[in-house]
Amino acid sequence: PRTRFAPVKTTNDMLALMSDAYEVTADFRMVLKAERSGVPPNIKLDGAYKFVDALQTLVPAGCAPSLIGCTKLTIEGKMTFEKGVTIKGDVKLVNKGEASATVKAGEYADTTVDLTAA
């Protein structure tokens, strides 16, 4: 069960693990925080982030967004998170442009945000 360990099979799982939705226990296990009630955030990353090196461009310097209150996060297109991004509820971030967009620090709750440059 997930109480024993936190499986990481995809970069979706890795982003969740990098966030504040998980914590390290005294015996060095990665477990979901109690506030998550045993349910990890549902994360769907764009195919551009299939590999770890690409995921690192999404969260430079390990600045993963806060996902403690996230139900579902969908990312479509190239982007980078600034430090201080909080995701709550069901959020979809979209960038249809070729250039990478920046997800600015702040709270995003139950919304779809189009980051495509005008």
Image (cartoon, rainbow, N blue to C red):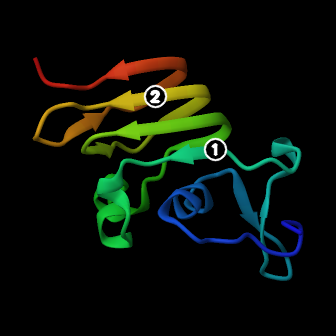
- Seen in the picture, residue 110 relative to 40 is either above or below; the reply is above
Query: From the viewer's perspective, is residue 19 above or below residue 95?
Result: below
Q: What is the x, y in percent for residue 89?
A: 65, 26
The amino acid type of the residue labelled 2 equals Lys
- Residue 65 pos. (x, y %): 50, 44
What's the distance in space between the residues labelled 1 and 2, CA to CA? 12 Å
Q: Left or right of 32: which side holds 59?
A: left
Which residue extends farthest bottom? Answer: 27
Q: Sort mark 2 into few (<14), some (14-19) or many (20+) by Cα contacts within 10 Å.
A: some
Lateral position of residue 23 relative to residue 73, left or right: right
Q: In which quarter of the image is the C terminus?
A: top left
User: Residue 42: which disc?
Assistant: 1
In x, y percent, where is residue 13? Answer: 59, 61
Secondary structure of residue under mark 2: strand
Question: At 50% across and 17% down in the image, what residue appears?
Answer: 111
- Residue tagged 2: 92
Of residues 55 and 10, the one drawn nearer to the viewer in this rendering: 10
